[in-house]
Amino acid sequence: MRTAKDPDPEDTTMRLMATLLTCCTLMTCEVSVARDDSSLLRAQAEAWDRAIVAQDRAAIERNLHADFFQIDTRGQRHARAEFVDNLMDPQLRIEPYTVPDLEVVQHGDSALLTGTTRMHGTYAGKPFTSHYRYIDSYVREHGRWRVVAVQVTAIDEP
C-alpha cells in the first residue's frame, strides 16, 4: 500500500515527460525567434544599403539609433548627424553594392552584423572604389532594431 509520501511512479513519469516537452517547446520557440530576428536584421541591412545608394535621408535616419556613431577607415569618430550629412552630400554618388558574406550574431537585444563590400561611385565627378570590412552594432529597443555603431576597416588590395 502506498502512503501519501510515496509518489505514484506513473504520475512522476508523466510529470517528467510534461516538463521535458515544455522545455523542448520553449527551446524551439527561442531558436525560431532568433532565426526570425536574423532574417529581419538581414532584410533591414539590405534595405539600409539601398537607402544609402538612393540617398534616402528618411530611410537612413529611421535605421539609426539616437546615440549612433561611426568609426571610419582612418579611425575618426562621426556622430549621427555628420554621418547622415556625409551620405547626403550632393557630390556623392554610390553605385548599388552587395555584401556577399553578411553574418548576423545576436546576443539578446543586441546584434552584430559584419561583412565585406566593394563600393564604387563618384565624388565631385571623380570615380572612387573602396573595399572594406565592417561591423554594424544593432540594439533592439521597444521591439525595433536600430544601428547604434558602425566600424569600417579598409582592406588593402594585393
Image (spheres, rainbow, N blue to C red):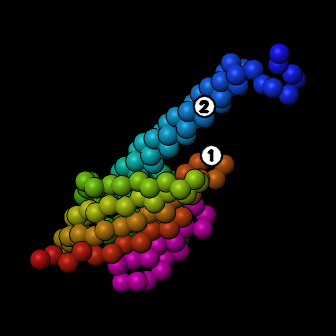
Does residue 40 appear anywhere in the picture? no
Magenta stretch, main secondary structure, is strand
Mark 1 lies on a secondary structure that is: loop
Q: Determine which quarter of the picture holds residue 25.
A: top right
Kind of residue sitting beneath label 1: Gly
Q: Amino acid at mark 2?
A: Leu
Q: Residue at x 50, y 68 (%)?
A: 149
Which residue occupies the extreme left position in the image?
158
Q: Is residue 83 above or below residue 26?
A: below
Q: Which mark is residue 126?
A: none
Of residues 58 and 47, the one nearer the viewer is: 47
State the residue at coordinates (39%, 77%). Answer: 72
Residue closest to the eye, 36 or 97: 36
Image: magenta residue range: 63-79
Q: Which mark is residue 20?
A: 2
Q: Quadrant of the N terminus?
A: top right
Image: 3 above or below 51 = above
Q: Which mark is residue 143?
A: 1
Q: Looking at the image, which is closer to me, 16 or 5?
A: 5
Residue in the picture at 62% in, 46% down: 143
Residue 86 in percent (x, y) is at 42, 71
